[in-house]
Image: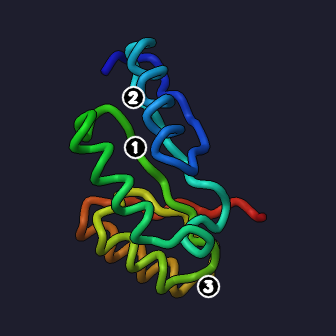
């Protein structure tokens, strides 16, 4: 996509994600999709993993990024990485964050600092 900055949008449904990607595409940029805070706990890791797979199949992996907020739950953050989510937010124990970053680096993924809720 173009050099213009990605468009960051919080999404909690397939329809919202599709609309955000379409809007970003119309501007020639990739959509930067963010889950709501603690979404891994509220919606479930597998729900967002399937959303990620559906969007990748429909739009291609270069059309968007998806960051899943896992709150302070290292187990959910690990599950998200295993399920193929390439960007997770985690605000738990620093030792757990370090371990997750190590796992993420092996999977070409990233662990972002979770914003306080």
Circle on res. 30: 2
**N-term mark: 1 or 2:** 2
Q: Nearer the viewer, residue 114 or 36?
A: 36
Element assignment for label 1: strand
Q: To which residue does mark 1 refer?
A: 65
> Would you say 85 lies left or right of 75 here?
left
Circle on res. 117: none
Q: Is residue 42 above or below residue 12?
A: below
Q: Nearer the viewer, residue 25 or 100?
A: 25
Look at 39% across and 28% down and name the residue there.
Answer: 30
Would you say the residues marked 1 and 3 are in contact, meaning their CB atoms lie under 8 Å apart? no
Look at 42% across and 83% down and name the residue there.
Answer: 99
- Spatial CA distance of label 1 from label 3 is 25 Å
Quadrant where the C terminus lies?
bottom right
Q: Is residue 32 above or below residue 46?
A: above
Would you say the residues marked 1 and 2 are in contact, meaning their CB atoms lie under 8 Å apart? yes
**N-term mark: 2 or 3:** 2
Look at 45% across and 12% down and name the residue there.
Answer: 27
Q: To which residue does mark 3 refer?
A: 93
Numbered disc in front, either 2 or 3: 2
Quarter assignment of residue 104: bottom left
Image location (x, y in percent) of residue 5 = 49, 23
Image location (x, y in percent) of residue 31 = 45, 32
> Would you say 91 lies left or right of 52 here?
right
Q: Residues within 10 Å of mark 1 (few under 14, many from 20)?
A: many
Q: Residues within 10 Å of mark 3 (few under 14, many from 20)?
A: few
């Amino acid at each position: 996509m173009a050099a213009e900055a990605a468009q960051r949008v919080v999404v909690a449904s397939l329809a919202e994600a599709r609309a955000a990607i379409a809007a970003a595409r119309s501007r020639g940029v990739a959509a930067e999709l963010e889950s709501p805070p603690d979404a891994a706990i509220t919606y479930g890791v597998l729900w967002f993993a399937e959303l990620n797979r559906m969007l990748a199949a429909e739009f291609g992996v270069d059309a968007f990024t998806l960051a899943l907020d896992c709150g302070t739950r290292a187990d959910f953050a690990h599950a998200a990485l295993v399920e193929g989510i390439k960007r997770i937010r985690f605000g738990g124990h620093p030792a757990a964050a370090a371990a997750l970053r190590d796992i993420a680096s092996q999977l070409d993924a990233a662990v972002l600092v979770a914003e306080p809720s």
